[in-house]
Image (tube, coloured by chain):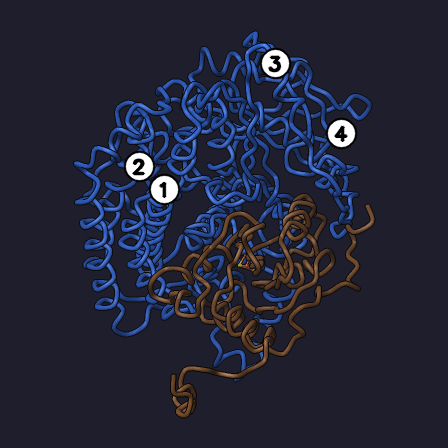
Amino acid sequence: MDLSNTHMLDDAVVTTTIDTVVSWGREASLWPFVFGTACCAIEFMSTAASRYDISRFGAEVLRFSPRHADLLVVAGTVSYKQAPILKQIYDQMPEPKWVIAVGACACTGGFYDNYTTLQGIDEIIPVDVYVAGCPPRPEAILDAVLDIKRQLKREPKFEVRNTDFKGKLDDV
Amino acid sequence: MMSKTITLESATLFSTIKHAKEALGFTFLLDITAVDNLNKATPSSGRFELIYILRHNTFKEIQLYKVALGDEDLSIESISSLFGSADWAEREVYDQYGIHFQNHPMLKRILNHNEFVGHPLRKDYEITKGQYCTTSQDLMDEMKPLLDARKLDMNKDELMIVNLGPSHPASHGTIRTLAALDGETIVAAAAEIGYLHRGFEKSCENHNYNQIIPYTDRLNYCSALMNNIAFAKTVEEMLDVTLPDRGIFIRIILSELSRVIDHLVCLAAGLLDMGGQTNYWYLFNPRNDAYDFLSKLTGARLTNSYMRIGGMTHDLYKGWESDLNDVLKKIDFGITESLKMITHNRIYNDRIQNVSPVSASQAIDYGFTGPNLRASGVTYDLRFTDPYYYYDSFDFNMVIGSVGDTYDRMMVRFDEMHESMKIIKQAMKRIPSGEINVPNKDITMPSKESVYGGIEGMMNQFKLVIDGVKVPEGEYYGAFEAANGELGFYIVSDGSGTPYKVKVRPPSFYHMAAYPKIIENYQLADAIMTLGSLNIIAGEMDR
Ligand code: SF4
């Protein structure tokens, strides 16, 4: 076998780092778990429907089991009653995982500054991207997905994220 | 205008309500609520009053019964043996006010979580005092008596308990159902709600009337404008004012468009649950076009906050007719295409015909209203029985079903969309020009020019913003035919710009109360379809 023309392999072999390959894969296949509770969830439905079409960004494989998902989209108001359920779902998701808080309610409690509503989901779980709006337009939700993609490229690939986070429901 | 109320002694309540139901024809219990008199300047009686709202079987007349409770003994006879709908209604009063109902089958919290201490709608409960919840309840306290009543045993009968929700793709929001299964068949079920309880009623007591409008948007967020209109209309009736005709016609057009949007979402999601994904696209996409129209008009797609007490923020824009016509054409196309796929489709028909039927008398007992009630063959639609806003002058039909099964509930909605579009088309032809707001400077905001250009306008604006619209003292129950049924507001005013109390009569709350009963003896997969067909909207149910 003639080994003199190894230059032909130039087009077939790419040298890169393992990190780049991993984030290349992750970025194009985020699997969201939609924790939709209220009005914002209706706008998430629009984001998934054909006009805005979240599949253009590789995030259309909506999972309904947290164990299959790596992106938690919290769309809607989270009440104190709902909080332990959200926490449980977050805990069930395998690492690495990212969280988007969609809308004023998930970010801060919104205009429900009262006895029922958790004043922002970051009281119990870590949040990576906050989306403003009540509800945010579908474009804003798509923008948050793009933000996550940018973020995961910059991060270390094989470390458990947010180990130092401590939420209000963590030691009970 | 204020509602007429009959004041009763607590000892005679049960017999009076029984008499009203059996002899006077008030067969429909709309709602039960309470008022805490703690902050009233001149309380008429003890600290708590209970309000029972009943409707006559001709569906025209409403009767309010009021009972003052003694301060030492916060309890009263339960009427849940007379009306199925009283069961959850009384639980809510217990949860929010801490009033006990004797002989109630299962008196426990319903909206607030099980670790909650206190009763939030009492005036001395501070609005911002939240309480963390750490665990969810297992609901076996409700399941056990159900199984005992059916003489079933978990082990001997080899039953399996399945929990659906509150975070489940087919549970449409935040509804939790616990079902005991024998094979695939549900032998007993219990439901838990309150996961989206957002303190609407408490918030109302802390905001003036116009500030409440954005909160009403988020009751039934699939038809936000309709809640705006229902609330504004109720307050206007308390103020004894009516909108100029153009304002009324705008409200009719937008209500009916919202009804169509609501039904589109319900049917799209219901068919998606069944695996009919193409239907989802056909029904959901025209809804997006309707949202484009609404955002052009109001600035928001979903939560429009377009109405104000005494009118709306601004008039229709130039060229709205052609935009709306275009939307109607697209909706019509979506419905037609979707119907082509399902009308003669055996999977569709076989899966939902004769599933979870609700008879007319059962439906009334459960407190069903709207399309779900009409599916059972009851001819009750406020637009016909007690017409407001010139509805009696439009040419449209009431759509009714025959057996009240899942199929009827879905098909009634399909046909209602056609009727609503008929109304919109007629209203577009008839809409007059002229003013849209009530010409009363104590109610309607002055124009921007006069606020910036003169002291009188500025003062006027200042007073309306700081004090709000002052509503005369009294209490009133106003009802509106919303997409899901009778949406009522019971408002108590102390004469200021902030309501003393607001209670929503949410159609979904009562539909949900019946859900665990009607899915019994059907398969688990049928229950998913039934839930979709009832169109439970958590925002409105839990408030
Ligand atoms: S942010 Fe606004 S739209 Fe979203 S869930 Fe909260 S109230 Fe609803």
Question: Do tag 2 and tag 1 residues touch (Cβ < 8 Å)?
Answer: yes
Question: Do tag 3 and tag 1 residues touch (Cβ < 8 Å)?
Answer: no
Q: Distance from label 2 to label 1 (Cα)?
A: 9 Å
Dot 4: chain letter: B
Residue identifier under label 1: B270
Chain with brown colouring:
A
Dot 1: chain letter: B
The label on residue B410 is 2
* Mark 2 surroundings: few (<14), some (14-19) or many (≥20) residues within 10 A: many
Residue identifier under label 4: B46
Residue A81 lies in what quarter of the image?
top right
Query: Label 2's element?
Result: helix
Q: Distance from label 2 to label 3 (Cα)?
A: 38 Å
Q: Earlier in the sequence, mark 3 or mark 4?
A: 4
Viewer-closest of B40 and A73: A73
Residue A82 location (% of width, % of height): 65, 45
Chain with blue colouring:
B
Query: Label 1's element?
Result: helix
Same chain for the residues under marks 2 and 1 in the image:
yes
Q: Distance from label 2 to label 4 (Cα)?
A: 47 Å
* A110 left or right of B310 in image: right
Residue B536 location (% of width, % of height): 46, 39
Residue B414 location (% of width, % of height): 26, 42
Q: Distance from label 3 to label 4 (Cα)?
A: 51 Å
